[in-house]
Image (spheres, helix red, strand yellow):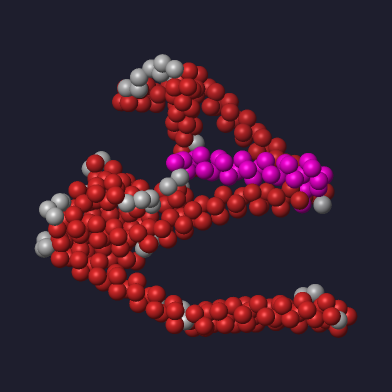
Amino acid sequence: MQALSLILILGGGAVLLGAALVLFALTRFLGGGGSLQKRVQDYAALPKPSAHGDRRRSRLSHLRLRLNAMLSALNSDKIGLQLMQANWRMTVTEFVLIRFSLTFGSLMIGWLTTGSALPGLGLAVIAYLVPGLVLQRRIGKRQIGFERQLIDVLVLITGAVRAGFSLLQAIEVVVREMKPPASEEFKRVLRETGLGVALPKALRNLAARMENDDLNLVVTAVEIQYQVGGNLTTMLSAVTETIRERVRLFGEVRVLTTQQRYTGYLLSVLPFFIGAMLFIMNPEYMSRLFEPGPILCIPIGALFGIVMGHIVIRRIAQIEV
């Protein structure tokens, strides 16, 4: 315990020293101006703020720019893609700094309030995992929402193209008429094409963010149409009908496998319920199951069997459409 406390003290001191060095470098960077600020001002030509609130926002914007430039080594393509999938308006550097600040702060709070290093360490692990879990939950929620809107988006695009619009103009109609997340994602496609990215490439980026098989089918069809030509309206109508039938078939399969899935849930939960009832009725009888030790005992093997059985039932009931 003393060795662990010494390690945590040394680690906390190292983190504080690193934070002091970053703050010192940031102070010098902000005070010195630097060539980066000059280049940004030359190209951006930002007007001088007139109000106090505008000056504060301008300072925060410049601070974010310089902080991200100074800590660019923290950038990660994987985290950057996840932030785009979640539509969080922050950089990878800011997300990493927030995550480690919460971790270190939770470690110090748990340590100081309890007087022991282990509660602080446990709280730090939880604080480190929470931002990632929230990010994944946000990504999953947006992807499910986009999947539910995809049929309506394709119908709207097909109707606009049939009316004489180009594909880009049809995407603009989607941005105006649809709700988030579809409008946000297709607005990003328009922004990328406005910056010079080819439309098939922008659509591939959209497919990478949404990770949807139906959208991959649409993007593949658009790429083929761009390469070999053809009737775009007929192609979009065929793809829309294919996706609609696939969704209908997937719904039917889920209805047919409902009994098997819920049977698996029931069989997985039932042993715990029965064990709890027996503990209440006769705890002395149930306590003998944990002999000869807490590791090599019957409940450990039973738990392993329950988990394996649940996995096998889920695999049997899972049918790919």
Q: Is residue 70 visible?
A: no
Q: Residue at x 82, y 52 (%)?
A: 1
Q: Is residue 53 above or below residue 218?
A: above
Give 270 or 227, whichever is nearer the viewer.
270
- Marker count (numbered): 0
The picture quadrant where one finds residue 207 is bottom left
- Tell me where the magenta segment starts and ends, as one range: 89-118
Q: Is residue 142 visible?
A: yes
Q: Is residue 219 left or right of residue 110?
A: left
Q: Is residue 94 left or right of residue 109?
A: left
Q: Is residue 142 left or right of residue 273?
A: left
Is residue 104 one of those drawn in magenta?
yes
The picture quadrant where one finds residue 163 is bottom left
Q: Residue at x 35, y 22 (%)?
A: 46
Q: Is residue 180 above or below residue 24?
A: below
Q: Residue at x 47, y 31 (%)?
A: 64
Relative image position of residue 155 (x, y in whole percent): 25, 61
Relative image position of residue 75 (x, y in whole percent): 46, 44
Relative image position of residue 2 (x, y in whole percent): 82, 48
